[in-house]
Amino acid sequence: MNAHPKMPNSHSQALAKRAGQVIPGGVNSATRRLARPYSWDWAEGAYIRDVDGNTYLDYHAAFGPILLGHNHPGVNAAVAEALHGVDMVGVGVTEAEIRLAEKVVEHVPSAEMALTFSSGSEATYMAVRLARGVTGRSKLIKFQGTFHGWHDYLLMNIISSPEKIGQKDPGSAGQLQDAIDNTIVVRFNDLDAVEAAIAAHPGEIAAIFLEAIPHNIGCVLPRQDFVEGLRRLCDEHGIVLVFDEVITGFRHGLGGYQAKLGVKPDLTTMAKAIANGYPCAVVAGRRDLMMQFSTAPGGKVFVGGTYNGHPVGTAAALATIAALEDGSVYERTFRLGERMRTGLQEIADRLGIAMISAGYGSVFTPYFMDGTVERYEDLLRNDTARDVGFRSAMIEHGIFMLPLAIKRNHISAAHSEADVERTLDVAETVLKTMR
C-alpha cells in the first residue's frame, strides 16, 4: 500500500478537471468537494482505492452507511437476486416492502407502522409535513449543531461561526424566509431553553426534531434527563417528538439509539446504515400518526415517490438487517470502537496533546481541545487547524479520515483488530509531529 506523504494524485486531478466541465464543482454533493480531489475505482471490506492506485483503510464510510463493510457479499447477493425479480411496477406493493416494514416495526421501539423512502432528507421532510398536518401548527424546534437534511425547514444552525450563535444561520441561499422564521433554534442539552421556546410560542410548535446523537458535529451525547424532559414537554403541549436516527438508526443497534435511551419518540426517521450504502430510508412511528399519511384511506398528509420501496434498496435493507440480528456485528464494532477511542486518548495524554477522544459504539471523533463537550458551543474551542492537519496526515499515511474538522469516523464489521492497532500506531507517529 502507498503510505507516504507524496501519494500520487495526477489521475484524480485529471478526472476532477474533467468532472468540473460537466458537473458543478466536479462533485454531486457539496460535502464531497475537498481541497485535494479524489476519484475512486474500487472498494471492498474496510478499504478503498483511488484511480492513482492509492489504497486507504477507510473510516469515512461514506458518512456512515457502510456498517458491514464495502461491497458486502451478502448484501450484494440479495441485490443481485432482486434484479432478477420484479423491478418497478408503480402500483400496489411487493412482499419485500412488507417484510421490511415488519422488520422495522419488530426492532424499533417507537415503530408501529413504517413508510419507505430513498434518502434521509426525504424522510425528515415527510416527518415535518406529517407533524404540521396532524397538529395544524407551523413552528418547529431544532438544536444548534444538528443536521436534518437539505430542505428549507431545518437546514440552519449546523456548524455555525461564533458570531452566528444565538441567531438564525440558514445553510443556503434560496431558503424561504417563512421557513426560516418558523424554525426555532435552541441549545442542545438545555431543557430550560426548550421550555422557554415553547412558552414564547404557546400552541404554535408542531414538532421538536432531535438528532438522537448529534453526529454531524462528531459525537455529542444527549443527557438522559434532557431527552426524558423533551418527551414530557411534548406530551404536555401536544408537540410531535421526532428522533432523527438517520445516522444512529441501525449503526448503534437495530432499535436505534432510542432503545439505549429507553425513550420513545412519536416519529423516527432512519436511513444510511439501514441498507449498508444502498438508497433506502424510513419514516416510522405511532399508528395514529402514520395513518394520517395519504397512503391510508382518509389520510390528509400527501406522500408520494416513484422510487419509494425500490426493490434494490429494499433487498439491501433486508439483507443488512439479517446480518445484524444476531448482535455479533454490534459486539465487534463496539469493542473495536472502544479500543480506538481509549487508544487515541492514551496516546494524546502521553504526548501532552490536548485532545478529547469522543464517540459511541462504532463511532470515534478526536476533538483537539480540553474540557467537556455537551453542546455545539463547546466545540468552538476545538483547534480546527490541528484537527484538519491530523486528519490530512493520517490520509497521507494510508488511513482515510474525512479531512474536515469535528467530523466523525466509523468502524465497520470489516475492520479488524490489526486495522485498529495499525491506525493507532500511525496516529502516534502523526501526533508526535504535532507536539
Image (cartoon, rainbow, N blue to C red):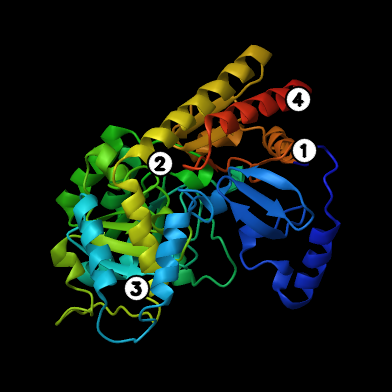
Of the residues tagged 3 and 4, which is closer to the observer? 3
Would you call the spot at circle 1 few (<14 residues within 10 Å), some (14-19), or many (20 or more)?
some
Kindly indicate whether the residue at mark 4 contacts the one at mark 3 (C-beta within 8 angstroms). no
Residue on which the image places disc 2? 188
The residue positioned 53% from the left and 29% from the top of the image is 417
Viewer-side residue, 329 vs 163: 329
Lower sequence index among marks 1 and 4: 1
What amino acid type should be assigned to the residue bearing mark 1? Answer: Ala
Task: Say which mark, if any, is on residue 434.
Answer: 4
Of the residues tagged 2 and 4, which is closer to the observer? 4
Q: Can residue 49 be seen in this view?
A: yes
What amino acid type should be assigned to the residue bearing mark 3? Answer: Gly
Question: Horizontal and vertical percent for residue 41?
Answer: 69, 60
Lower sequence index among marks 2 and 3: 2
Label 2, label 3: how many angstroms apart (C-alpha)? 34 Å
Residue on which the image places disc 1? 3
What amino acid type should be assigned to the residue bearing mark 4? Answer: Met
Q: Is mark 1 on a helix, strand or loop?
A: loop
Q: In this rendering, would 114 be left or right of 157?
A: left
What amino acid type should be assigned to the residue bearing mark 2? Answer: Phe
Of the residues tagged 2 and 3, which is closer to the observer? 3
Question: Horizontal and vertical percent for residue 238?
Answer: 17, 57
Lower sequence index among marks 2 and 4: 2
The tally of labels here is 4
The residue positioned 41% from the left and 77% from the top of the image is 84
Compared to residue 368, the image places residue 271 above or below, namely below
Lower sequence index among marks 3 and 4: 3
